[in-house]
Image (cartoon, rainbow, N blue to C red):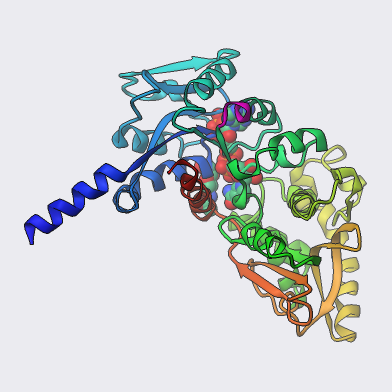
């Protein structure tokens, strides 16, 4: 028995491929990705795969291994980064032992990322993973793809910028994955891509793509007040620090744009009609978060309650959704049949209904938790692993 197992280990070792990874952004999602990479060592080795993390950046600096061509950070070091970045405001210079790595700051960060991409992209492949929330990374990403790097995104902003930048970003479609940008770990983009690739035209997508707004609308359906639900959600950490970032619908609009562009629509953010759940007078330019939560929000309760009641009298329910159909992309409140996948939605799940020729009366439905650091990082890791096939 011992001989057999040793032989199979050797077989694994000889056929294994190494994927260098450069991580941009080490917040909730990025640091969980590092954690998952370490936790999955055995699993990956059984798959003949080694992930070698050569660099990690945050908003201030970039940590690089000394020799990006041959080495990666030790697992202990990755775990230390994970722990350090768990506290907000932390920076890489607080790490105990910077040992055999370089810490780069300022304008040098971008230069170094591009150098590493140039060095590794063509030969071994390099996975550049964007776990920032920055609109700026698109410029870096659009440079590194020219070196043949793979790009994996949790960050929506590079995909929702000007169409010209988007075109460039997806110009090598086999080398980019962005599943985690819509529905975190749920296979929404993969499913849409499969349906389209089979020649089955999609004519409508409708989805509740914000966990916070799914939760808010299902609580309102149960007769609760918007203000009370938002406060409760905030206290459980389900909302952004300023809940108006959820209530504005802009995050849903970004996801809608990603899906519409996936369908081949050449549109921009400005082409999406977005209904905010609060008026401009209650916006961040007019009042503080605290005033909004304490006073401003109360004035929204009646209006939304009346709309929910009106929907209910028609045997429908109110949901905050994106609707992509007939060359229009809309984000806002809609009345939907109670007896539909979106109508039956309870709690904070994401739900997407996809209608195509094959899925017309009964849509393809994807549902589940659509956020969370852990789940999102798992979605990112699945994308990295998926891209390894390019290098066999
Ligand atoms: N969390 C979720 O459930 C979820 C789900 C789906 C998608 N996403 C998306 O995933 C991305 C990451 O989310 P998160 O929750 O991890 O955000 P986060 O906690 O705010 O982390 C963002 C990270 O990016 C770094 N950063 C900011 N600007 C940067 C730049 N120009 N270059 C390099 N690093 C930069 C920040 O640095 P500092 O550490 O120095 O601040 C931080 O480490 C976001 O785009 C988000 O929309 C999140
Ligand atoms: C995700 O990570 C961020 C940043 O480290 C943290 O503030 C937040 O509480 C985490 N969220 C969850 C649900 O664990």
Q: Is residue 10 left or right of residue 288?
A: left
Quarter residue 130 falls in: top right
Q: Left of 162 or right of it: where is 84?
A: left
Left-right relation of 192 to 177:
right
Q: Residue at position x 34%, y 52% from top?
A: 47
Is 61 a magenta residue?
no
Let me know if residue 124 appears in the view. Answer: yes
Q: Position of residue 78 (x, y in %)?
A: 36, 35
Task: Estimate the x, y position of residue 333 in percent, counting from the top left.
Answer: 85, 65
Examine the residues drawn in magenta and state their main secondary structure. Answer: helix
Count of labels in the image: 0
Quadrant containing ligand 1: top right
Q: Quadrant of residue 185?
A: bottom right
Residue span colored magenta? 144-148
Give percent across and percent down for residue 143.
Answer: 65, 25
**In which quadrant will I find the N terminus?**
bottom left
Front one among 162 and 17: 17
| Residue 329 in the image: above or below residue 96 | below
* Residue under the point 91% across and 51% down: 279
Asked whether 237 or 177 is in front, the reply is 177
Identified at 51% across, 40% down, the residue is 30
Along the viewing direction, whichever of 198 and 344 lies nearer the viewer? 198
Q: Is residue 136 above or below residue 347?
A: above
The residue closer to the viewer here, 232 or 122, is: 122
Residue 146 covered by magenta stretch: yes
List the single residue furthest toward the left: 2
Location of residue 303 (image quadrant): bottom right
């Amino acid at each position: 028995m011992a001989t057999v197992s040793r032989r199979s280990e050797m077989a694994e070792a000889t056929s294994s491929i190494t994927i260098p990874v450069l991580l941009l952004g080490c917040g909730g999602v990025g640091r969980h990705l590092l954690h998952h990479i370490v936790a999955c060592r055995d699993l990956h080795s059984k798959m003949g795969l080694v992930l070698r993390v050569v660099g990690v950046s945050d908003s201030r600096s970039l940590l690089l291994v000394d020799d990006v061509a041959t080495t990666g950070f030790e697992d202990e070091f990755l775990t230390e980064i994970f722990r350090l970045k768990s506290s907000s405001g932390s920076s890489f210079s607080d790490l105990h032992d910077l040992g055999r790595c370089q810490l780069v700051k300022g304008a040098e960060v971008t230069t170094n990322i591009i150098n590493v991409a140039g060095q590794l992209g063509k030969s071994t492949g390099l996975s550049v993973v964007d776990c920032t929330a920055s609109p700026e990374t698109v410029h870096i990403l659009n440079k590194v793809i020219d070196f043949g790097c793979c790009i994996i995104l949790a960050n929506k902003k590079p995909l929702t910028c000007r169409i010209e930048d988007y075109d460039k970003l997806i110009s090598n479609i086999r080398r980019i994955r962005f599943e985690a940008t819509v529905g975190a770990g749920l296979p929404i983009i993969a499913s849409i891509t499969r349906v389209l690739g089979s020649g089955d035209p999609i004519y409508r997508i409708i989805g509740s793509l914000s966990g916070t707004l799914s939760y808010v609308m299902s609580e309102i359906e149960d007769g609760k007040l918007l203000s009370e639900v938002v406060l409760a959600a905030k206290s459980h950490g389900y909302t952004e620090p300023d809940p108006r970032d959820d209530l504005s619908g802009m995050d849903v609009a970004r996801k809608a744009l990603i899906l519409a562009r996936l369908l081949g629509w050449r549109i921009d953010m400005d082409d999406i009609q977005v209904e905010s759940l609060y008026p401009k007078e209650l916006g961040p330019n007019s009042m503080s978060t605290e005033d909004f939560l304490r006073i401003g929000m109360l004035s929204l309760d009646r209006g939304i309650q009346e709309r929910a009641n009106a929907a209910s009298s028609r045997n429908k329910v109110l949901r905050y959704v994106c609707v992509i159909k007939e060359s229009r992309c809309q984000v806002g409140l809609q009345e939907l049949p109670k007896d539909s996948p979106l109508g039956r939605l309870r709690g904070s799940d994401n739900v997407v209904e996809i209608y195509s020729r094959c899925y017309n009366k009964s849509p393809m439905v994807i549902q589940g938790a659509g956020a969370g650091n852990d789940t999102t990082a798992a979605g990112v890791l699945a994308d990295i692993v998926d891209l390894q096939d390019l290098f066999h």
